[in-house]
Image: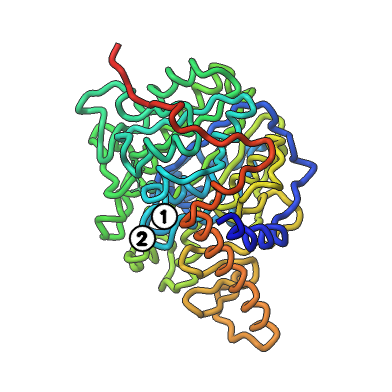
Amino acid sequence: KASDLDDVFSFLKKNRSKANIEYYGKAKGKNVFIIHLESFQQFLIDYKVDGKEVTPNLNKFYHNQNTISFDNFYHQVAQGKTSDAEMMLENSLFGLPEGSAMVTYGTQNTYQAAPAILAQRGYSTAAFHGDVPSFWNRDNAYKSWGYQYFFDSNYYTEKPSYSVGYGLKDKIFFKDAAKYIQQLPQPFYAKLITLTNHYPYELDKQNVSFPATKTGDNTVDPYVQTAHYLDQAFGEFLNYLTKTGLIKNSMIVLYGDHYGISNNHRPAIAQLLHKQTITSYDLAQFQKVPFMIHMQGLKGGINHTYGGEIDVLPTLLHLLGVKDDNTVQFGNDLLSKKRNQIVAFRNGDFVSPKYTVVSGTVYNTKTGAVITPNAKQQAQIKKMQNHVTTELSLSDKVVLGDLLRFYTPKGFTKVNKKEYSYKYADG
Ligand code: GP9
Ligand code: MN
């Protein structure tokens, strides 16, 4: 019932941070590209194998003077992996502790997602992905989120050699997507979900142009090779944006959806990071993924604020000059001057600038040393833990109870899923 939202609103009222006026509206009216870097971890940025950069194009983009790059940005996914990341980015709602919210609650629930918000402000909205439309229930969830177009695998040229693993190879994907991007009325909001840098990091021989790492762990070693391929594909897409001039009137947002190397590979992770042993603290740090915002004229630099995927939507809306104080979003603008900087992992662990808490053990975030908290610290940590537990459970309450059906923010029109069909018709 509607009153179930009461605690949600009282929590949000206390916890949402104000937009930074230096950035608010800076991207108003620009096209938006959201580029989803599959399984891409932050440690890959500036990482070298045999003296060679794994991702030279992304590194250049990361250090570009017009890119705001975050170096304390974490993925917050659970079992829903990619779908949890998408759920957070588009809605600023968490995925669920188990399963995938996009699958279980993507079809029936009411959402007030990024595509719908922007479409109602004159944007065209499109998602691009080289896998079948039903994967993660995208074909239904995207309708609930108000995507006007979904260019799934049916929309791209098919040849057996064009696919590897889950679907279309990234270079072909970006090239083919460009044909549709060209036809989108501007301004547009376009999300491109890459695929090749996905476990088991397979690549056809002709595309392997980077040495594997030599940890001896076969799951881990080819990771840098597909990451390198993804980087090349991104480089080509960036060239296209430059050539067509799209780069001039677009904001380009990049993010890694989640880890590529799971915690089951500690010895290999230790070798990759040139460490003797890997602690739970190191593994928490290892969950960092890239988040970058690029736009001509934007004052860039490396931003050290602590945040995660839940914080993306408010950040982007503020840059686009969209007021969102009356929406149900659990994240906080990463560019705000005053933020709480507590990053919740889906299992209730958390990272903050001071403390990292993993299964009850407290670490000093700056040094990684285990802390035995004194009474004062204990009180601080308890408060932070309580914040994390509360935000996760309130977000779950919204999703499980489909609570947004009871509340439509002022200026927002409920999405009518029947307006959309993503079916590809030949000819
Ligand atoms: C499949 C792709 C992979 O379409 O998005 O999802 P993941 O396995 O990373 O959750
Ligand atoms: Mn993924």
Residue receiving disc 2: 262
Residue 299 in the figure: left or right of residue 80: right
Instruction: Estimate the x, y position of residue 400 in percent, counting from the top left.
Output: 46, 57
Classify 130 as above or below 402.
above
Q: Residue furthest left?
A: 160
Q: Are marks 1 and 2 in contact (CB under 8 Å)?
A: yes
Instruction: Estimate the x, y position of residue 49 in percent, counting from the top left.
Output: 40, 50
The quarter holding residue 120 reads top right
Instruction: Estimate the x, y position of residue 204 in percent, counting from the top left.
Output: 24, 36
Residue receiving disc 1: 259
The quarter holding residue 308 reads bottom right
Q: Would residue 153 be seen by someone viewing this image from the given angle?
A: yes
For mark 2, give the secondary structure: loop
Which quarter of the image is occupied by the C terminus?
top left
Q: Would residue 39 be seen by someone viewing this image from the given angle?
A: no
Classify 12 as above or below 365.
above
CA gap, disc 1 to disc 2? 6 Å
- Here the colouring is rainbow
Front residue of 336/292: it is: 336
Q: What residue is rendered at 56% in x and 71% in y?
A: 356
For mark 1, give the secondary structure: loop
Front residue of 418/44: it is: 418
Crowdedness near tag 1: few (<14), some (14–19) or many (≥20) residues, C-alpha within 10 Å: many
How many numbered discs, if any?
A: 2
Q: Residue furthest top?
A: 427
Q: Residue furthest bottom?
A: 375
